[in-house]
Amino acid sequence: MGCQSWIAKLDAYLDGELQPADAHAVSEHLRECAACAAESLSRVQMKRAVQIAGQKYIPDEAFRARVQSSIAPRRRLAWGRLWIPAFASLALLLIVGGSYLSLLNQRRSSQQLLSELADLHVATLASSNPVDVVSTDRHTVKPWFEGKIPFTFNLPELQNTPFTLVGGRVAYLSQSPGAELIFRVRQHQLSVFIFQERAAGDFAAGNSDQSAQSFTVRSWSHKGLRYFVVGDVAAADLDKLSDLLKAAQ
Amino acid sequence: MCVSERLPPESFEQLAMPLFERLYNFACWLTQDRHEAEDLVQETYAKALKGFSSFQAGTNFRAWIYKILRNAFLNSRSGLKSATVPIDGEDGESVLPAIQENPESILLQRNDWQLVQSALEQLPVAHREVLLLCEVEEMSYQEIAATLAIPIGTVMSRLSRARLALRSAVQGMQKPGEMKKS
C-alpha cells in the first residue's frame, strides 16, 4: 500500500474512528514511515491547536443565571411538592426561615463536594497508575496541563521542604476539568485539586478547614480558582503545603 | 450522554445546564457576535425545554440540543447570510488531499493557537462548525452526523476539506520564516 492510502486513513485514525485492526495497521506504518509520521504529527498539532483555540468564549455568570431561571420554574414546583409536606407546617417553615434553609443547602452541597473530592483522592491512592504525568519536576508537571484544563497555576519550589511532587492528572468536578496534583510527605500521599470557582458551585466561600470521610481538607480561593488540599496527614503538614501553594500563586 | 428511560421534565435542567458553557462557546463561534450568541443560546434552551417531551429517551441528548441550536442559528439573520456562502462540492473524495498538493507540512509553535483562532474565524461556517464539533466538542462522526443532519460520509469529506482550508489559512498567516518543511 502506498503512502497515499495510509494518509487517506490518517484523519479517521487520529479521530479514533478506525476499527482496531485498521488502527493497528496505521500505527505500525507510522513507526516505519518518516514522511507519514511527520504528516501525522502535523495533523495532531493542528487538532490540539484547534481544541485550545476553539475554547475561546466564556459566558458571564449573569447570563447563565438568566437562562437557568428561565428553565427553572418546573423544578421549583417539584421541589416544593417534595419538601413542603416534609415540614410539619407553614409556621415551622417561617420559623426555620429562608436563610437557614439556604445555609443548610450550602453546607450540604459543600459536604457533598468534599466527599466527592475525598473519593477522587481515595481512587488515586488505590490506582495502579495514580498519575498521568509522572515527574518530581514542577517545570514538567505544570506544562503537561496546558491545553488539558482551561486555566493555569503555579507550583511551589519544594527544595528544603518535606514534600515531594509525584505527578498530576486531570480530574473532573461537576463536569469541569481541573488539576489533581499528587504530593508525598513521608509515607503519606496528598492530593491537591484545583478547579475553576464555578465547578465548586455552592461551596462555602472563603478559606475553610473541613473534613470528609476522615480526610482533612484545606480549601481556599484565589483569582477565580478554588484549591483543595486533601490528605490524612497531620494538620500542620496540610497547612505547610497550603502555604507553599498560596505563596507560589 | 445517553439516557434509556422516560425522562421527567425536571431532568431537563440536569441534562442541559452542564452543556451551557459549551453551547455558548459554539454559539459565539457560529455567530461571531456575543449578543447574537446569547439570543441564540436563550432561544435554544427555550425551544429545547418546550420540545423536551418529544426528546426520545435513549438517544443522544447532546446531539439533540446542538441540533436545536444550529437550526435556530440557520434561521437567524447571520445563519441565513452564512448559508449563501458556497462550500466546495462534498461528493468528492473524503480524505484530505495529502502531501503532494500541500507540500509544506506545518509544524505549529506552542503559542500558534492564536493564529489558529484567527484562521478559524476566517473559515466558512460549515467548515468552522464541523471542526469545532470534532476537535472541541470531541464528538464522534456519528454524533456530528446527527447534529448536522448529514450522512457520515459527508461528515468525513467536510472535515477533510475544513482541515485543508484551516491549514491553508494558517500557512497563509504564518511568516515564511516560521514555516517548516515536514
Image (spheres, coloured by chain):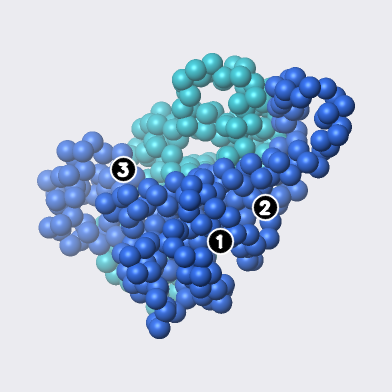
* Disc 1 residue crowd, few under 14, some 14–19, many 20+, Cα 10 Å: many
Same chain shared by disc 1 and disc 3: yes
Q: How many numbered discs sit on the rendered protein?
A: 3
Name which quarter of the figure residue B43 lies in: top right
Same chain shared by disc 2 and disc 1: yes
User: Judging from the image, what secondary structure is the residue with disc 1 in?
Assistant: strand
User: Judging from the image, what secondary structure is the residue with disc 3 in?
Assistant: loop
* Nearest to N terminus: mark 1 or mark 3: 3
> Do labels 2 and 3 touch, CB within 8 Å?
no
Nearer to the camera, A27 or A222: A222
What colour is chain B?
Answer: cyan
* Nearest to N terminus: mark 2 or mark 3: 3
Q: Which chain is blue?
A: A
Q: Which residue is mark 3?
A: A16
Q: Say which residue appears at 58% left-offset and 40% top-offset.
A: B18
Q: Position of residue A231 (x, y in %)?
A: 45, 59
Q: Say which residue appears at 32% left-offset and 55% top-offset.
A: A130
* Nearest to N terminus: mark 2 or mark 1: 2
Q: Which residue is mark 2?
A: A204
